[in-house]
Image (cartoon, helix red, strand yellow):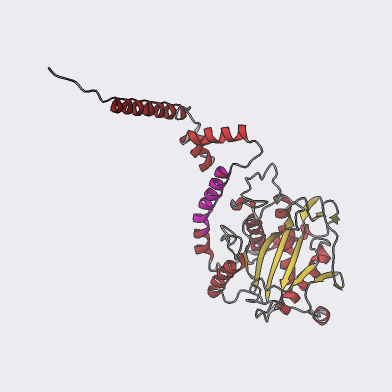
Amino acid sequence: MKITVINLKKIIKYIFVFFAIAIIVILLAKSLKTDKTIKQEEKNTSLIKCLKYELPITNVVEENINVERKNKTNWAIKILSMQIGILDNIIKNKIDDEVSLELPKEEYIEPEEQEEIKSEAEDLENKYTKIIDENNIKETYTNKYKDIKINNQTEFDISSIIENASYTFTDNKKVVIYHTHTCESYTPTENYKYPMTDSYRTTDLNFTVAKVGDELSSQLEKYGFNVIHSKTYHDYPSYNGSYGRSLKTLESILTKNKDVEITIDLHRDAVGSKSNYAPSVQIGDEVCAQVMFVIGTDGSGLTHDNWRKNLQFAIKVQSIADELYPGLFRPIILRNARYNQHLTTASTIIEVGATGNTLEQCLASMKYVANVLNKATE
């Protein structure tokens, strides 16, 4: 007689595994069920949108988080946006930097074109100018020379420098523009909406001071300046050490372009937690962001033999700005930090607007700043 031995433990185990697999298959089927008909233009809008269509589980997770925690940040999407912003720009930046490490050769400008540029510059002048007090802060300064105001935050006595301020430019009109804090951005508008990767910061350079740098470069080139504009990230992924990284970028550029005189580290101002701080000036019918020179010294102990020349450069430029567009420039700030300004005799930080300003206002300022720089170097 044959006896069949039934192993109940094994049977139960197999049944459990079968049902577990079935449940997983059902869940995956539900999560993968989505409309695959996507408009081509929607596919091309951004990598993030494509990911949401191609990986529907991303949408499910995001929708659940939005329903359950409407007021909390979706950090996964935020980090993904940040990384994609970097990847979208990193290749372009690398190409731009490799192409623009050396200044372009000077091009001959036809007399007719020179007259047109001169006419455009004249149209920018003789305009009504008024500082806008709303969302602004009171100017503070320690020294005044004619109409030029200087906020001296160092222990240096600068009275003799101011009284004898005289700066003579070379005639090469070569400029380097770069950004120690490349990701600084502004108040979003209808035309310039963007996802912040941090408070008033984004890795998408179409919405940061790098975009303002593009505009300044374009405006300066109209006057015959040769411009290198570096949009290398220096404050991402880490903000700390930004000046050390931007110093390496600047040194690399100047090694190949030893006769560059003017270097501009273009920033956006930030004052504590005042997110609505928007220093602005009306020029004609336009509202423009105010700008400000920040000049470093050797007060920190770092070697900086050029700081007095840098200050004289800023005074000369600002004296012309105050004649043409009173209020466009806020008082010059003099500080103990070096800010990479020891490499040339006309090095400066220019802060354009603040968090409360719009990108439109900052872009509008650049044609006036370019005109001032052109007048100063004539």
Q: Residue at x 57, y 58 (%)?
A: 236
Quarter of the image containing the C terminus? bottom right
Residue sitting nearer the eye, 191 or 11: 11
The correct choice, above or below, for 345 with respect to 122 in the image is below
Total numbered badges shown on the rendered structure? 0
Farthest residue, direction top: 1
The correct choice, above or below, for 164 with respect to 140 in the image is below
Q: Is residue 167 left or right of residue 99?
A: right
Does the magenta run of residues contain 83?
Answer: yes
The correct choice, above or below, for 219 with respect to 303 in the image is above
Where does residue 318 sit, x and y in percent of width and height? 78, 68
Q: Quadrant of residue 268?
A: bottom right
Prevalent SS, magenta region = helix
Q: Residue at x 67, y 51 (%)?
A: 199
Q: Is residue 57 visible?
A: yes
Residue sitting nearer the eye, 124 or 290: 290
Where does residue 183 sit, x and y in percent of width and height? 62, 56
Where does residue 114 sit, x and y in percent of width and height? 68, 63
Q: Quadrant of residue 9?
A: top left
Q: Is residue 226 visible?
A: no
Quarter of the image containing the N terminus? top left
- What stretch of residues is rendered in magenta? 76-93
